[in-house]
């Protein structure tokens, strides 16, 4: 099994070295940084398996990073903070952190919580690989789309759009987000690109394209895949 990479965001050098050595000795690859800004920059280029996050950071509160990441990723986030007030813990969990550890923490507990968060993420990822609604099945792992058991041939753009909707099943994805992810950020104003491709997708997937059951339009916002 490939070694999983963990990003540690912690400005206290002694604690950072302690965490790094604990994680490395358990076989993880570890990268670290000391500010929210460097963590954001890192995340643009890398996708670590888990984020271990301090809250009191020099440039911003670690919670801003939770909010930032949760708008784009399901990556497990484990907060490690000296703040032990219930309000701090609850606010981090509400923002989307997976777990919260109060410093000081022992190596065994830290590693156990990391294992739990990674295991949970793996279960979620596997569960999310096959999305179905009605007679439509989208296997994100195999890149396969079936309608009433029959494979549907989609172009790469059509599949890219459908898979984004499938990964967020039930949730509206804005037209601009679809444009940015499928065509690139310089195309976010080219709404007709999405409309044309959605028309093609509906022609292939819907019985009556004008009365879609699967790919639903949220007027003025974007699209979503219906929930089963
Ligand atoms: Ca700190």
Image (cartoon, rainbow, N blue to C red):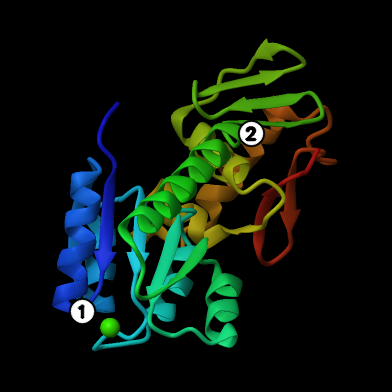
| Residue 42 x/y as whole percent | 22, 62
- Which residue is under mark 1? 11
Foreground pick, 157 / 133? 133
Q: Is residue 51 left or right of residue 166?
A: left
Q: Quadrant of residue 200?
A: top right
Indicate if the residue with disc 1 has its beta carbon within 8 Å of ligand 1. Answer: yes
Which residue is situated farthest in the top direction here? 150
Q: Residue at x 19, y 46 (%)?
A: 25
On residue 100, which mark appears? Answer: none
- Asked whether 19 or 10 is in front, the reply is 19
Q: Residue at the spot x=68%, y=55% of the render?
A: 171
What crowding class fits label 2: few (fewer than 14 Cα within 10 Å), some (14-19), or many (20 or more)? many
Picture residue at 61% right of the left edge, 49% below the top: 168
Considering only vertical position in the picture, is 149 above or below 57? above
Image quarter hosting the C terminus: top right
CA distance separating discs 1 and 2? 48 Å
């Amino acid at each position: 099994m490939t070694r999983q990479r963990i990003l540690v965001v912690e400005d206290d050098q002694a604690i950072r070295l302690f965490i790094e050595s604990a994680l490395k000795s358990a076989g993880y690859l570890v990268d670290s940084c000391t500010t929210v800004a460097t963590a954001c920059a890192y995340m643009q280029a890398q996708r670590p398996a888990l984020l271990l996050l301090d809250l009191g950071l020099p440039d911003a509160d670690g919670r801003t990073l939770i909010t930032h990441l949760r708008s784009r990723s399901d990556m497990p986030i484990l907060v490690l903070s000296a703040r032990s007030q219930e309000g701090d813990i609850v606010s981090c969990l509400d923002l989307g952190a997976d777990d919260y550890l109060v410093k000081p923490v022992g190596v065994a507990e830290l590693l156990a919580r990391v294992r739990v968060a990674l295991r949970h993420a793996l279960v979620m990822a596997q569960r999310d690989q096959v999305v179905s609604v009605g007679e439509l099945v989208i296997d994100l792992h195999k890149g396969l789309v079936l309608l009433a058991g029959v494979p549907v041939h989609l172009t790469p753009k059509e599949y890219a759009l459908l898979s984004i909707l499938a990964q967020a099943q039930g949730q509206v994805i804005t037209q601009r987000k679809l444009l940015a992810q499928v065509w690139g950020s310089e195309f976010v104003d080219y709404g007709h690109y999405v409309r044309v491709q959605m028309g093609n997708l509906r022609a292939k997937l819907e019985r009556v394209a004008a009365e879609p059951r699967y790919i639903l339009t949220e007027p003025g916002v974007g699209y979503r895949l219906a929930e089963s």
